[in-house]
Amino acid sequence: MKLCKGKIIRVQPKSLAEEIDLKIGDSIIEINGRKLSDIIDLSFELADEEIELLIEHANGEREIIAFDKDIDEELGVEFESAVFDGIHCCKNHCVFCFVDMIAPKMRRTLSIKDDDYRMSFLYGNFITLTNLTDNDYKRIKQFHLSPLFVSIHAMNPKIRAKMLRTPLAEKIVEHLDKLENAGVEYHTQVVLCEGLNDSEELERTISELVKRRPNVLSLAIVPVGITKHRRDKFPLKQFDRTGAIKVIEQVERWQKKLRRETGKTFIYLGDEFYILADREMPPVEFYDDFPQLDNGIGLTRSFISDWENEPITTNEYIKMTNIDVIAGISIAPTLKKLSNEIVHLKNNLNIRVLPVINDFFGDTVNVSGLLTGIDIINTLKSVGGERDGILIPESALRSGENIFLDDITLDEFKKNFPGIKIETVQSGAEFKRALMDFHSYKKLRVEESAYMWQSNAGYTKI
């Protein structure tokens, strides 16, 4: 049997962990004699007031540390991974799987096909339910792991099995019933493929999920993405402007109906549909507090809203300042429109938005979050003119780390542009602050690759 242990990579100052002398490199193996498979187990076991930790030190020696604590007192450690027994990987072979479309010889972590209900509960990762065991459902019910995030794709069992390439996908109704019987709420997603699960099949999927409210909290519909590295022979077709308009019009009928009946939109389209159709993004209230923002639903509108809510400063640029703004193809027009507002207000400021063609993954991939260091470098070097600063989208860097998808570090990137100030921006507010006073702007980035336990069954990625 595999030994499960939570390896500590950070101890917070003045925390309980520091008080009991836990060190970086220590691993927690058991609490009060109970083995741990993940931070969910750890959280519930640490709810006791009297604790015995079985610790394995970095040198392999083991020690039991006994102590008393308040019920709501946090331990104050961060772990190498949220799951101590390894991520449960997907056994499906989905026709649209993005992991199968990444470039060869990229870092191993990018090739992990996560289909782990724990990562769904903790961090909003989508799962198909086809890889859950009876014990998984029991644990979901026992710890009330809700809400979860479920990849539906189609409610037609045959179509879903065809898309996921497993007969287990046909049991979607049975699987959703199990979640609901366990008292679990869930957000849903459809990766829409033209000619496969759209039109009448999408109508069926929406209809059946609407009937499952209130257990179903939301439905996101995103267009399939294809990179140049896809080798799968299954025919997939991406949406064009005509197809995107058709999808928008179909979904809008449902959205208007649901808003009349409930005041909530419930069904949300990925931003790319509106970009492809050359349609304005829906207003903020349309997104109902952005329940699937991490899935890219409403990112553009959220960015614009953040921009609009950030006040304008009165300071001026004393000398001419030239800023290059890096952007994915899809967001570039929006950034150009917003940056022009600042140019018209400030003297001595020139802003150039540079859309980056994604040569690494293929030019059909047009989002900022999949830009690589080498493509950004090549784009910047291909244009002349004065340059005093560069703004890079935070999403192009690995979460919390100074590294691009192609393993170029931010420091290596900066060496290509000596003497030029380079900063990252994430929100619309940050983008506005950076443009209004670039010389003073500094993005504070905290490197993270860890998971922290917090009291009261709270789970936070740090």
Image (cartoon, rainbow, N blue to C red):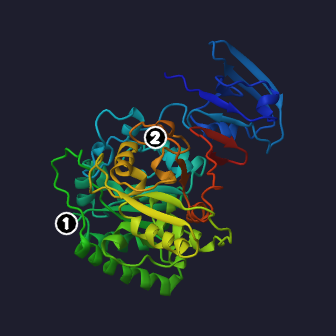
Going 31% across and 79% down the picture, which residue do you hit?
A: 250
Say few, some or many: other residues with alpha carbon within 10 Å of mark 2 (under 14 / 14 to 19 / 20 or more).
some
Vertical order, 414 against 365 (above or below): above
Q: Amino acid at mark 2?
A: Phe
SS of the residue under disc 2: helix
- From the image, tell me which residue sits under label 1: 195
- Nearer to me, 281 or 192: 281
Percent across and percent down for residue 349 are: 54, 66
Left or right, 111 with respect to 308, comes to: left
In the picture, the disc for residue 261 is: none
The residue lying furthest to the front in this view is 319
Left or right, 217 with respect to 31, comes to: left
Left or right, 11 with respect to 127, comes to: right
Q: Amino acid at mark 1?
A: Gly
Vertical order, 2 against 163 (above or below): above
Percent across and percent down for residue 42 are: 65, 36
